[in-house]
Amino acid sequence: MKAITIGLLGLGTVGCGVVKIIKKNQDKLIHQVGCPVVIKKVLVKDIHKNRPVEVDTKLLTSNADEILFDDEIDVVIEVMGGLQDTKDYLITALRQGKHVVTANKDLMALHGSELLTVASEYGCDLFYEASVAGGIPILRGLVDGLASDRIKQLMGIVNGTTNYILTKMSEEGRTYEEVLKEAQELGFAEADPTSDVEGLDAARKMTILATLGFSMHIDLEDVQVSGISKVTDEDLSYGKQLGYTMKLIGYAHREGEKVEVSVAPTFLSNNHPLASVQNEYNAVYVYGEAVGETMFYGPGAGSLPTATAIVSDLVAVIKNLRLGVNGRSAVTPQYPKQLKDNDEKYSKYFLRIHVQDEVGVFADITTIFAKYGVSFEKILQLPVKKNETSEIVLVTHKASLSNYDKILVELNDLHAVKEIKSAYRVVRKTL
């Protein structure tokens, strides 16, 4: 019963989790795959660094070649992060006939197609379940569980940092800056939180989800992205009055043969399945033509949840090894990429507008919306104490993005409009 030998690239938070799970669950792994699973070498920057997991220093190396060119290593697990060097390491590993498991969402979003092509050419597996939503088996759910269905819509809370911030702002009435600082102190947010709070992290994950869900090669630049850094406690308070909860939503929708993918702060009706996902948790809502509504929910990050997804991919690789079917699981996208134009993207919108408190202003605003065939679903009008200003809060019926953009331009040009304070997408219910 020959052992399967692992080379581990990286021994940070997730890497330590992988080591813990392989050690602790060795009996279960042997039961699952019929042989021991052994970590032979681990690539680290500092061999002498103290770590929260016990690893024999003889296993540690700062030279990647000791893993990439070791004929005894069957599988390379990559948890080091990074792009160009990491990509080169994985391509080398695949060309040496080694199977690869990675948690690197950035790498897969930008270079996944190239890596999967190399894996197929060399008869190797390349699995990346942990790259999206941590311990939630969403990619396997799309590829295997929903393989026979046609996915129409994917909506996801796929960034725990922003969900934590928005949850605390909403529940405790605190400002974005206050909660961000707390999230950094608790380790939920990085010292430089830009990738999370401006939506780039979520966009990379939605690139991967949309490519798999729609079987269409989606690039990161195809995703329209906006973040939460301009969301205010006033926005959330008005949303509550109108029955909405704010989330940073990754949204992918297919209509006919055309798709759209975006990431943006979004008001969800309180009865939407995603509205109740709190704090650092993630969830992905999937609508298929046959299955209807499904939702995948769980911890979106962390050492052990992410490591669980990685080791699950490892088990899949080993099972394929025993069956002799490695390198056959990658399926190239079935459809050519066709993106919707802005006049084909429809949504409801929430707008907060500060206007001069004078007769006829609302009529002027209504005229602009009517010009583009957009009506109102909800309206609030409140006085603002200073500067003789009124605040108008609107929720529209569905409008095309092209008409919505034109409305914003004309509102900004209207003399009585002092400022458009905020504007967000609204999702009231599922398909």
Image (cartoon, rainbow, N blue to C red):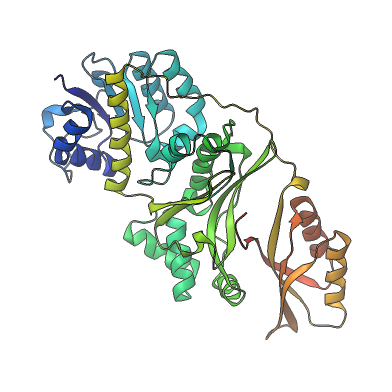
Residue 91: x and y in percent read 40, 20
Rendered image quadrant of residue 8: top left
**Depth check, front residue: 297 or 7:** 297
**Depth check, front residue: 73 or 161:** 73
Residue 366: x and y in percent read 84, 70
Q: Is residue 16 left or right of residue 54?
A: right
Residue 71 to residue 384: above or below = above
Q: Is residue 225 left or right of residue 280?
A: right
For the C terminus, which image quadrant? Answer: bottom right
Q: What residue is rendered at 46% in x and 34% in y?
A: 143
**Depth check, front residue: 166 or 141:** 141
Residue 187 to residue 56: above or below = below
Q: What residue is rendered at 83% in x and 70% in y?
A: 365
Tell me if residue 424 can be seen. yes
Residue 428 to residue 325: above or below = below
**Depth check, front residue: 354 or 150:** 150
Residue 100: x and y in percent read 34, 25
Q: What residue is rendered at 22% in x and 41% in y?
A: 16
For the N terminus, which image quadrant? Answer: top left
Tell me if residue 191 can be seen. no
Number of numbered callouts drawn: 0
Q: Is residue 78 left or right of residue 116?
A: left
Residue 292: x and y in percent read 55, 49
Residue 123 to residue 354: above or below = above
Q: What residue is rendered at 18% in x and 26% in y?
A: 34
